[in-house]
């Protein structure tokens, strides 16, 4: 293509018109904080770990647990706690390992792949947490309905029919999960839209 | 912080800053974003510098980190503003050196490049820098054949933009 060759010649001449930074300019720039995509994903992920961990703690100290404990559910709760801490530990380790793998010196494609993997780990962590909460909510509601004194001793006239009760519970839980899904979609959608587009562009190349 | 390392890094970058400026010109459209991207590239280069072994040329290593920053890591802070003034910022063509027709041709070429996507811009940039297809393929992480195929497609796309 003639135009591109012409451009190639002009390209070299362009160098004269480029800005020139001094040693001090560059030195100062180097001291500034990065605002890269990876840094953003990292900061948000750390916040998420704290958010979910603190939700867990609030739940424990709010007295909800003692109520269940008094109903002979201690073992169940210790089991759930250990399980959720193991999950947390697993994700922290995986997240750290993914993060360490991100290097700007890799090829563009490998770099993108590693960032997407980090992002996917965070997504999995969030979904595991959401489903954990949904299952717990659902189980607790069912338990309260069928096994607690207030409900099991109530007259049938006062109590709502079982199907209505379950529908309402499922509805509330769906709204809750939907809200979180939307929230994360917006956060990460804004952050990674361009990355995904560019990655697709490179992936698509390989299919040729 | 190792003063010697800092000094050698800043000196290296000062000498090779043209590469980064050229990338900024391709990927940004106004002086603010240009400086912003230059700064992010500097930070990324500095972060990666301790692992720069010196077995590769500093400039080769720079191409990779800088392009990666422009394509993948850099978060555009402002919405891209597209005006005629900004277009002319990107590439000042020295009018006295060309006749009108060539000048017009170059102007529309630079404008056309601005319309390409990030990956295509990277290919054109490396092509203009006279890089071999092997180098282009290594930097992008694709095969040499694919680099060629894609480059041909970019050429066709540019042609289409220029002669709709």
Image (cartoon, helix red, strand yellow):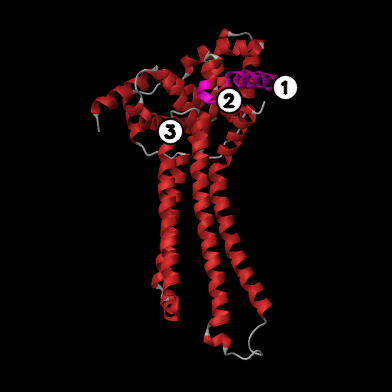
Q: Secondary structure at mark 3?
A: loop
- Residue B139 in the magenta stretch? The answer is yes
Label 3 CA crowd tier, 10 Å (few <14, some 14–19, many 20+): some
Label 2 CA crowd tier, 10 Å (few <14, some 14–19, many 20+): many
Q: Is residue A25 left or right of residue A136?
A: left
Q: Secondary structure at mark 1?
A: helix
The chain carrying label 1 is B
The image quarter in which residue A178 lies: bottom right
Q: Which residue is mark 1?
A: B160
Q: Earlier in the sequence, mark 1 or mark 2?
A: 2
Give the residues in magenta: B138-158
Q: Secondary structure at mark 2?
A: helix
Q: Is residue A172 visible?
A: yes
Q: Which residue is mark 2?
A: B121
Q: Residue B7 in the image: x percent, y percent?
A: 28, 24
Q: Which residue is mark 3?
A: A103
Please name the residue shown 58% across and 61% down the image: A177
């Amino acid at each position: 293509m003639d135009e591109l060759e012409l451009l190639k010649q002009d390209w070299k001449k362009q160098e004269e018109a480029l800005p020139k930074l001094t040693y001090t300019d560059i030195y100062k720039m180097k001291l500034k904080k990065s605002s890269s995509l990876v840094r953003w994903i990292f900061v948000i992920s750390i916040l998420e770990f704290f958010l979910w961990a603190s939700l867990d703690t609030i739940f424990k100290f709010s007295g909800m647990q003692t109520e269940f404990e008094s109903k002979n559910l201690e073992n169940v709760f210790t089991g759930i706690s250990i399980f959720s801490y193991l999950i947390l530990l697993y994700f922290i380790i995986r997240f750290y390992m993914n993060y360490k793998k991100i290097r700007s010196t890799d090829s563009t494609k490998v770099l993108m792949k590693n960032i997407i993997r980090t992002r996917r780990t965070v997504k999995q962590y969030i979904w595991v947490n959401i489903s954990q909460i949904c299952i717990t909510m659902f189980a607790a509601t069912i338990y309260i309905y069928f096994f607690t004194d207030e409900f099991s001793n109530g007259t049938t006239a006062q109590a709502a029919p079982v199907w209505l009760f379950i529908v309402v519970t499922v509805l509330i839980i769906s709204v809750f999960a939907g809200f979180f899904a939307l929230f994360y979609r917006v956060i990460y959608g804004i952050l990674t839209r361009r990355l995904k587009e560019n990655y697709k562009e490179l992936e698509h190349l390989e299919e040729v | 912080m190792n003063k010697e390392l800092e000094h050698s890094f800043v000196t290296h970058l000062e000498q090779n800053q043209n590469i980064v400026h050229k990338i900024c010109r391709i990927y940004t459209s106004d002086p603010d974003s240009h400086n912003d991207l230059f700064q992010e590239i500097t930070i990324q280069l500095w972060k990666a510098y301790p692992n720069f072994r010196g077995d590769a040329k500093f400039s080769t290593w720079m191409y990779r980190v800088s392009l990666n920053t422009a394509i993948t890591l850099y978060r555009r802070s402002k919405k891209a503003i597209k005006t005629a003034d900004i277009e002319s910022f990107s590439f000042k063509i020295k009018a006295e050196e060309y006749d009108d027709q060539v000048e017009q041709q170059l102007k529309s070429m630079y404008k056309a490049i601005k319309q390409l996507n990030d990956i295509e811009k990277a290919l054109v940039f490396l092509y203009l820098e006279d890089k071999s297809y092997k180098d282009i393929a290594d930097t992008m992480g694709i095969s040499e054949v694919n680099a060629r195929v894609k480059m041909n497609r970019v050429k066709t796309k540019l042609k289409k933009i220029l002669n709709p």
